[in-house]
Image (tube, helix red, strand yellow):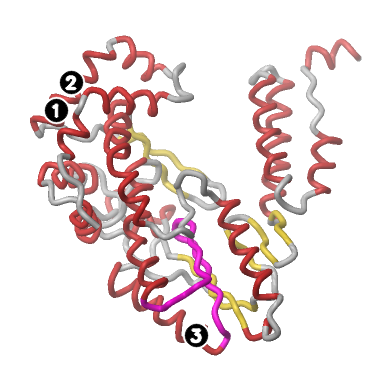
């Protein structure tokens, strides 16, 4: 595929920066940093444009915090002006790279997502279940160990060279990827909770929470996707970020999984997680938060527990006047939306019977 050209002009154009600002501000218009940026919008956009054109742009400081569900993750959030820059890049390269991705790559792409990935695997399992030799198929359930913390910066930049030869664009991506002030990576075998900041690595890793990190994650693993589809010839292969499943003949499963492990280690400097395994294709398989089978989707017990706990917490916050009705309503609608696509009748019933919203002042008056 032909590479992208004139990226400096396209990314730095005022119209592109303004649209990037609109995207970055969406749903965040009441935040203080967005209000401050918007107050002098034209001046701030021209300043970003000048720094990008002059080659003086530097990534601002990251705000670091931990997210504990579904597993401990260190999230690094950039300031608003840097998010505008990342949206400006994303707007120009995503339409190009998205066309290169395989159909069944579902992470951080328009009209994709976890539900679509789970339904894809479910449909394939149904196809297999109708075959006379259905028992001879199995699923390789793969997971890449510490993916975001182990992405190799040299390989990242090589991936971006496949997109464009524009030296200015490669400089800009290098500024974002190779941050000299903030280490993103983990040594092999370490967890984020166990690794003090001074032991983190500068040559690997990318910050969870960045828009460009999401794009880079897909570009990086697209090499693996293309190899699985075109070299291994896998018909039933689906990936959502660092989780993937492939349905293969039982006789080929071990050899295929070993080949995948070797490719990830040798070509992408990544390791398969110890959670990766081979399971029967006619059994329930956990994938992207669902229990998937030929009969349908179910929520994991852990997910149901999390939903109930979250809704109880929101109910208490509403009672204590901490949040308004719309905040709780949006969450309930979101969780109901999840249940509509899987076998979750009992969870729907639990929500209807247990999440009854009432302010404490009303409760006190009733007593």
Q: Position of residue 180 (x, y in %)?
A: 18, 45
Please report contact status of discs 3 and 1: CB closer than 8 Å, yes or no. no
Please report contact status of discs 1 and 2: CB closer than 8 Å, yes or no. yes
> Which disc, if any, is residue 51?
1
Query: Which of the two discs, 2 and 3, labels the residue nearer the N terminus?
Result: 2
Region in magenta? 231-250
Question: Relative to 73, does residue 16 appear above or below in the rendering?
Answer: above
Task: Say which residue appears at 36% left-offset and 41% top-offset.
Answer: 210
> Which disc, if any, is residue 47?
2
Question: Mark 3 falls on what kind of element?
Answer: helix
Where is the C terminus found, in terms of image quarters? top right
Predominant SS along the magenta part: strand
Question: Circle 3 sits on which residue?
Answer: 254
Is residue 21 visible to us here?
yes
Task: Say which residue appears at 68% left-offset and 17% top-offset.
Answer: 321
Q: Position of residue 177 (x, y in %)?
A: 24, 47
Question: Mark 1 falls on what kind of element?
Answer: helix
């Amino acid at each position: 595929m032909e590479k992208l050209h004139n990226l400096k002009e396209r990314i730095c154009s005022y119209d592109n920066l303004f649209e990037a600002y609109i995207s970055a501000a969406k749903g965040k218009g009441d935040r203080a940093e967005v209000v401050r940026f918007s107050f002098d919008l034209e001046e701030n956009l021209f300043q970003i444009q000048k720094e990008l054109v002059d080659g003086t742009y530097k990534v601002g400081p990251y705000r670091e915090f931990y997210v504990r569900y579904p597993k401990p993750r260190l999230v690094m959030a950039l300031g608003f002006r840097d998010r505008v820059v990342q949206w400006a890049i994303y707007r120009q390269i995503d339409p190009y790279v998205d066309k290169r991705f395989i159909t069944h790559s579902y992470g951080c792409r328009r009209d994709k997502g976890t539900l679509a990935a789970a339904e894809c695997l479910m449909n394939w399992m149904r196809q297999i279940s109708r075959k006379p030799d259905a028992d001879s198929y199995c699923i390789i359930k793969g997971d890449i160990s510490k993916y975001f913390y182990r992405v190799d910066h040299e390989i990242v930049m090589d991936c971006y060279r496949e997109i464009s030869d524009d030296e200015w664009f490669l400089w800009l991506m290098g500024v974002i990827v190779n941050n000299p002030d903030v280490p993103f990576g983990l040594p092999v075998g370490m967890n984020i909770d166990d690794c003090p900041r001074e032991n983190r690595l500068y040559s690997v890793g990318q910050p969870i929470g960045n828009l460009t990190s999401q794009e880079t994650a897909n570009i990086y693993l697209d090499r693996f996707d293309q190899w699985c589809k075109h070299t291994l010839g896998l018909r039933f292969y689906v990936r959502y970020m660092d989780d993937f499943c492939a349905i293969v003949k039982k006789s080929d499963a071990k050899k295929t999984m070993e080949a995948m492990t070797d490719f990830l280690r040798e070509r992408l400097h990544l390791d398969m997680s110890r959670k990766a395994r081979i399971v029967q294709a006619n059994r329930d398989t956990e994938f992207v938060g669902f229990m998937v089978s030929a009969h349908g989707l179910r929520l994991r017990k852990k997910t149901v527990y999390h939903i109930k706990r979250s809704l109880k917490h929101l109910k208490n916050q509403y009672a204590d006047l901490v949040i308004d009705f719309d905040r709780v309503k949006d969450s309930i609608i979101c969780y109901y939306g999840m249940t509509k696509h899987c076998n979750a009748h009992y969870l729907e019933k639990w929500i209807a019977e247990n999440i009854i919203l009432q302010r404490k002042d009303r409760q006190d008056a009733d007593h």
